[in-house]
Amino acid sequence: MSEKKIKVGITQGDINGIGYEVLLKVISNPAILEICTPIIYGSPKVMGYHRKTLDLTSFNYSIIHSASEAADNRINIVNCGDEETKVELGKPTQASGEAALASLSKATEEYEKKFFDVLVTSPINKKAIQSDTFKFPGHTEYLEERLGNGQKAMMILIKDSLRVALVTGHIPISSVATAITKESLVNKIKAFSKTLSMDFGIQKPRIAVLGLNPHAGDAGVIGNEEIETIIPALKETQEKGLLTFGPYPADGFFGSGQFAKFDGVLAMYHDQGLAPFKTIAMDLGVNYTAGLPVIRTSPAHGTAYDIAGKNIASEESFLQALYMAIDVSRARIRYNEARVNPLRKQYFEKGSDNEKLNLKEEQAD
């Protein structure tokens, strides 16, 4: 029996960056339609502008009003654009922010109605998208608010077996230390471990936890957060049976190759995790939002205004984001199916009627 074809909702992101370029390069490949049904939330006019500017291959698509109308074996575009929207390549504008928000808002609304299965978001400019209805640091916080059902999101950057999660996300550096508590760290470790098992099929994941201070505090010489918060959190998770290790000094952890010994790495703050990750995996990395009912991925790069419209942007990160969304969807299905009807444990005394009944049931099976 063949697996169900996944319906993938795709937001257009900032229309003045490289979002449409990498999107068009991916969906113009006919092989994509063999593995999923793409549903783009965007503007046919804007997409046409980018295709002509980049002189990319033309392809057939259907313009629809809702993902509920999406057809398999075809590119589908939910028109949520303003015909007067002007593309100004290479810079953030009010129009590009409004277009990005219209796409994201419509996609979120239709995901809630279960019109598609997974979400892939194109890069946005966090300043341009701000409005009365979007007052968030980024996609992660917006989706947590709209689709989280009270659950907390966690950002994970992924390339192959390198998976870097963050304890704190889009917050100022001055707020990081106070935002990290033993309770929050324990919850992040547990959530990370569950995600590695549920979404990536790793049964007993090994998680490395980085220190907050230089040299992981040097036993209190350069800060006490490791002694007072991180190490106690590690001990608590270890007592719960989780395979957690650390805290490791962040400065040499990636350069020495230590990360290769673990299934996941937990960084304390945004740049501590993302700077080394993007150095290692910029063109192939995927931003994955864990911890929420929605499966959402995004390319690890940003809008890249400096190369917008030049036809030199690599589509590999976007392609990997698409593949990952599909793979995680199937992994979750398998994970949930394995737990719907677990084998019942039979408790009985040797020679009892229960034992005889159980034997008959086994023979009947």
Image: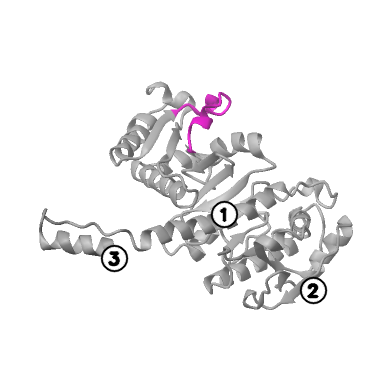
- As drawn, the label of residue 327 is 1
**Residue drawn at the location 62% of the way across and 77% of the way down:** 68
On the image, which quarter does residue 139 sit in?
A: bottom right
Q: Which residue is mark 3?
A: 364
Secondary element under disc 1, as helix, strand or loop, is: helix
Q: Nearer the viewer, mark 3 or mark 2?
A: 3
Mark 3 or mark 1, earlier in chain? 1
Mark 3 or mark 2, earlier in chain? 2
Residue type marked 2: Glu
The C terminus, quarter of image? bottom left
Q: Vertical placement of 138 versus 114: above or below?
A: above
Other-residue count near label 1 (Cα within 10 Å), few / some / many at <14 / 14–19 / ≥20: some
Residue type marked 3: Ala
Span shown in magenta: 248-264
Other-residue count near label 2 (Cα within 10 Å), few / some / many at <14 / 14–19 / ≥20: few
Mark 1 or mark 2, earlier in chain? 2
| Left or right placement of residue 293 versus residue 66 in this view | left
Residue 264 x/y as whole percent: 48, 39
Residue 105 x/y as whole percent: 61, 68
Q: Which residue is mark 2?
A: 83
Residue 322 x/y as whole percent: 64, 55
Q: Nearer the viewer, residue 121 or 216?
A: 121
Visible residue check, residue 97: no
- Marks 3 and 2 sit apart, C-alpha to C-alpha, by 66 Å
Question: What scheme was used to colour the molecule?
Answer: one colour
Residue type marked 1: Asp
Q: Is residue 254 magenta?
A: yes
Q: Is residue 209 magenta?
A: no
